[in-house]
């Protein structure tokens, strides 16, 4: 029995020794990252990356969570995407999508208007600025996608008159039509500005989630993607999100 207890205590001491070494490594990595980027750097987590003996360092930024990689001695800092050669999976992108995910049920959909096509069983949240040229391009792709409900969050952050145009869209009798006329046909909305809008709330919402560009898309499974995409890719992602 004594021998067994001694063996158990020895195991515990060794285990805690390894744990202490791990924490010491993470602490030194954190210190080095803050020294490199500045004292106002918000390091949210440090973990083993799982390849090349690197650490994955997550930094909170206005654009959302960023990932950098560093070695155990924090002598080198690696920026950019890591792609697994055999599967061609972009490991960094996949991690960022997961880390920057937004719970769809947490979105205040009352601050958006709906565009429904077909049965509308697939859902998408779409943060858009009426003066965003990329949004206009994406709306043309979006018009080709059926069986979708799009919740459009007006986010006037690009041009000086973005807020005025967004207000006119929101104050229109048919917001979806006013938006589509503007984005697909270049027909400006004519509604007066005499109504309450959620624009300030949407700007606050974008700051909460680190959304600082349009278009930004949030899928039913919480996946967030900055930027538009072709209709075929969008339809594929909508199907995958619905399946999950």
Image (tube, grey):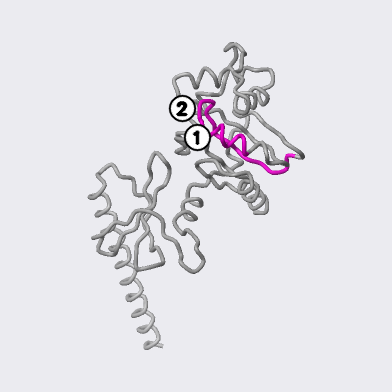
Q: Where does the magenta region start and end?
A: 120-141
Identify the residue at image location x=29%, y=68%: 21
Instruction: In the displayed orientation, state which residue is furthest to the front.
Output: 185
Residue named by callout 1: 214
Identify the residue at image location x=41%, y=60%: 82
Residue named by callout 2: 157
**Is the residue 236 above or below the residue 12 in the image?**
above
As for residue 125 lying within the magenta part, the answer is yes
Identify the residue at image location x=64%, y=28%: 113
In the image, taking residue 22 as reference, residue 161 lies left or right, namely right
- Spot occupied by residue 29 in the image (x, y as percentages of width and height): 28, 58
Instruction: In the displayed orientation, state which residue is furthest to the right.
Output: 119
Q: Quadrant of residue 243?
A: bottom right
In the image, taking residue 107 as reference, residue 200 lies left or right, namely left
- Spot occupied by residue 80 in the image (x, y as percentages of width and height): 38, 54
- Spot occupied by residue 83 in the image (x, y as percentages of width and height): 44, 61
Crowd band around label 1 with a 10 angstrom C-alpha radius: few (<14), some (14–19), many (20+): many
Q: CA distance from mark 1 to mark 2?
A: 9 Å
Front residue of 112/189: it is: 189
Front residue of 221/236: it is: 236
Q: Quadrant of residue 103?
A: top right
């Amino acid at each position: 029995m004594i021998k067994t207890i001694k063996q158990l205590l020895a195991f515990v001491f060794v285990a805690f020794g390894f744990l202490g070494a791990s924490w010491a490594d993470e602490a030194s990595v954190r210190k080095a990252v803050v020294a490199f980027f500045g004292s106002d750097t918000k390091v949210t987590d440090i973990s083993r990356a799982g390849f090349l003996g690197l650490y994955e360092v997550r930094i909170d930024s206005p654009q959302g969570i960023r990932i950098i990689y560093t070695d155990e001695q924090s002598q080198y800092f690696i920026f950019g995407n890591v792609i697994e050669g055999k599967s061609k999976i972009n490991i960094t992108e996949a991690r960022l999508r997961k880390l920057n995910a937004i719970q769809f049920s947490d979105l205040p959909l009352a601050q958006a208007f709906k565009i429904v096509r077909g049965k509308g069983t697939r859902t998408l949240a779409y943060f858009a600025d009426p003066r965003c040229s990329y949004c206009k391009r994406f709306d043309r792709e979006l018009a080709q996608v059926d069986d979708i409900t799009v919740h459009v969050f007006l986010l006037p952050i690009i041009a000086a008159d973005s807020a005025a145009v967004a207000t006119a869209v929101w104050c229109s009798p048919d917001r979806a039509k006013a938006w589509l006329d503007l984005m697909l046909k270049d027909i400006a909305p004519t509604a007066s500005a005499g109504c309450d809008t959620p624009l300030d709330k949407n700007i606050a919402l974008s700051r909460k989630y680190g959304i600082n560009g349009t278009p930004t898309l949030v899928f039913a499974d919480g996946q967030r993607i900055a930027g538009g995409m072709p209709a075929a890719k969008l339809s594929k992602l909508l199907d995958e999100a619905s399946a999950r």
